[in-house]
Image (cartoon, rainbow, N blue to C red):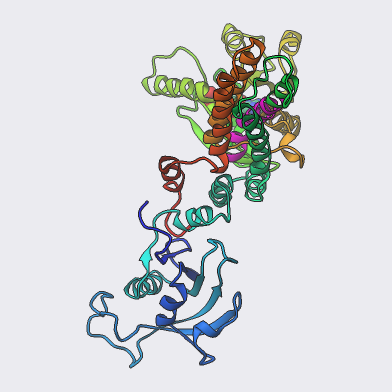
């Protein structure tokens, strides 16, 4: 990302397409000067005279100095003043703005042409188009947000479930940053002592006792480990869980999908081999997003289409966060059923014995003994609510809902935590083996730096580039 903070940047902040209103955002030292070129307040006062954070009705005009060819206006001049639109304009004086810079937001009607022209005039008047994520990057560079909070802006925008949104909001308020930064600070304190040349391993330690060192490093390690352990659940909360329905043909997989979705999404017939493809739909389980996948029933078949479907079933099965095994409760277990149960035994799964509205003929105790299993009827809906609760409980522990624990949702954060845990483990080992302070300090430093990457206390252009390139322009 090029360009320093001395530039004034502009971009359309609202989504592409038509909208009731659309917003062009300007940020940087010249924001007010640039906006003044296009904004004529109805009050007749200059834009520079308005109080910060107040909204003003204005006309947007194309200044006479702007090259009309550039705006593709051709020869058409509708009025002498070239009125573009009417708008509400707000000035947010630095540092009380999103970027901590001078910001002007122009809220015009949400037409692509209007917004594009407002941007062009701004560029003609001294601003430049913002890079992807540049507003948020500036908020970070100006110390308004730490890196984990900047990432939470994107998570908030992209949230697909209320649970995901909830976590993004807590990260945005600095929950994760606080926990990580506290831990990093304690490690830096240790380092200050160690690097001051105190041989804490020897006897007669005057400054930092060896036990104290072990205590601080162990505590930091435990915090990093605890945070890292939330990452799998965090990913599910952010992106949704991938739940795959598996079972022999005709056991009622598609009926179960339809029942969970509350709509007739998949074709259901009495003919085994009805579903030939994987069908994916999302459901919201109490704020947690589930990507639910119905599959082709597994069996040996000569049918080319069905064989392809079965191949896809296997791929989906490998990627599943949880497998929902469907058995036909009215029939004895077959070898295929047993094989499937064996296949899923070491991974998250729930077994449902379907068709409970008919007579159970099968000896199901063996299934209940080895698996979490429920009797349900996809036809009548009995047992479905229990299965839903079980699904949610297996996928998310509920720990994230308590106020105390920060949940890690990003792979970048998880990796940094993993490195911190590893280095702190090594540091502890070195202390226990009576290694010299220098060696211990290298590991503690590595861990502290890894934690610093999460908040951005330690950062590189590469890390920043990776993060902000995921944003789109205007954020
Ligand atoms: N009585 C009863 N019949 C059911 C129930 N669930 C499904 N069925 C019937 O079982 C048959 C097969 O249902 P599907 O949902 O198509 O089964 P499937 O597992 O998707 O089958 P394939 O797509 O062929 O693998 C249909 O005739 C359904 O009406 C149930 O709970 N009770
Ligand atoms: Mg089916």
Q: What predominant SS class does the magenta segment belong to?
A: helix
In the rendering, at what x and y percent does residue 400 appear?
71, 37
Is residue 318 shown in magenta?
no
Would residue 363 be found to the left or right of residue 47 on screen?
right
Residue at 53% in and 38% down: 453
Tag count in the figure?
0
In the rendering, at what x and y percent does residue 296 appear?
50, 24
In the rendering, at what x and y percent does residue 83 appear?
39, 86
Question: Is 146 drawn above or below residue 192 in the view shown?
Answer: below
Residue at 72% in and 10% down: 370
In the rendering, at what x and y percent does residue 49 appear?
54, 85
Q: Give the range drawn in magenta.
A: 219-239
Is residue 224 shown in magenta?
yes
Would residue 349 be found to the left or right of residue 385 on screen?
left
Residue 356 in which image quadrant: top right
Would residue 188 be found to the left or right of residue 49 on screen?
right
Q: Can residue 269 be seen in this view?
A: no
Q: Nearer the viewer, residue 358 or 100?
A: 100
Q: Nearer the viewer, residue 56 or 115?
A: 56
Question: Is 373 drawn above or below residue 78 in the view shown?
Answer: above
Q: Which of 310 and 470 is in front in this view?
A: 470
Question: Is 169 drawn above or below residue 196 in the view shown?
Answer: below
Q: Can residue 309 be seen in this view?
A: yes
Q: Nearer the viewer, residue 171 or 341?
A: 171
Residue 290 in which image quadrant: top right
Residue at 58% in and 34% down: 451
Residue at 39% in and 18% down: 303
Ligand 1 quarter of the rendering:
top right
Would residue 67 be found to the left or right of residue 234 on screen?
left
């Amino acid at each position: 990302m090029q360009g320093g903070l001395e530039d004034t940047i502009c971009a359309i902040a609202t989504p592409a397409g038509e909208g009731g209103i659309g917003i062009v955002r300007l940020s940087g030292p010249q924001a007010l000067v640039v906006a003044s070129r296009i904004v004529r307040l109805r009050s007749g006062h200059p834009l520079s005279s308005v109080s910060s954070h107040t909204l003003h009705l204005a006309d947007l005009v194309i200044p006479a100095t702007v090259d009309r060819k550039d705006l593709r206006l051709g020869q058409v001049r509708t009025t002498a003043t070239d009125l573009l639109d009417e708008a509400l304009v707000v000035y947010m004086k630095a540092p009380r703005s999103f970027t901590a810079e001078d910001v002007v937001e122009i809220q015009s009607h949400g037409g692509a042409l209007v917004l594009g022209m407002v941007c062009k005039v701004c560029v003609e008047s001294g601003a430049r188009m913002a890079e992807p994520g540049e507003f948020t990057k500036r908020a970070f560079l100006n110390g308004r947000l730490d890196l984990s909070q900047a990432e939470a802006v994107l998570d908030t925008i992209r949230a697909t479930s209320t649970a995901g949104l909830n976590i993004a909001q807590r990260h945005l308020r600095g929950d994760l940053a606080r926990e990580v930064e506290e831990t990093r600070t304690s490690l830096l304190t240790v380092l200050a002592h160690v690097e001051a040349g105190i041989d804490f391993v020897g006897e007669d330690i005057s400054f930092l006792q060896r036990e104290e060192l072990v205590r601080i490093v162990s505590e930091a390690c435990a915090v990093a480990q605890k945070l890292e352990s939330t990452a799998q659940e965090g990913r599910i909360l952010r992106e949704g869980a991938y739940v795959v329905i598996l079972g022999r043909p005709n056991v009622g997989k598609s009926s179960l999908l339809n029942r969970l979705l509350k709509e007739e999404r998949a074709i259901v017939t009495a003919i085994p081999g009805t579903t030939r493809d994987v069908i994916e739909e999302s459901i919201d389980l109490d704020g947690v997003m589930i990507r639910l996948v119905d599959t082709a029933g597994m069996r040996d078949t000569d049918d080319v289409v069905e064989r392809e479907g079965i191949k896809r079933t296997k791929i989906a099965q490998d990627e599943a966060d949880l497998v929902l095994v469907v058995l036909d409760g009215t029939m004895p277990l077959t070898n295929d059923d047993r094989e499937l149960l064996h296949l899923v035994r070491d991974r998250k799964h729930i077994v449902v014995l379907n068709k409970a509205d008919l007579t159970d003929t099968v000896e199901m105790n063996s299934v209940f003994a080895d698996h979490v299993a429920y009797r349900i009827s996809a036809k009548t809906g009995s047992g479905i609510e229990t299965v839903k609760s079980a699904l949610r409980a297996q996928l998310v522990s509920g720990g994230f809902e308590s106020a105390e624990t920060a949940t890690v949702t990003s792979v970048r954060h998880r990796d940094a935590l993993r490195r911190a845990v590893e280095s702190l483990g090594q540091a502890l080992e070195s202390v226990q083996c009576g290694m010299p302070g220098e060696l211990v300090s290298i590991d503690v430093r590595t861990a502290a730096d890894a934690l610093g990457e999460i908040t951005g206390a330690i950062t590189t252009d590469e890390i920043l580039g990776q993060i902000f390139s995921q944003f789109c322009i205007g954020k």
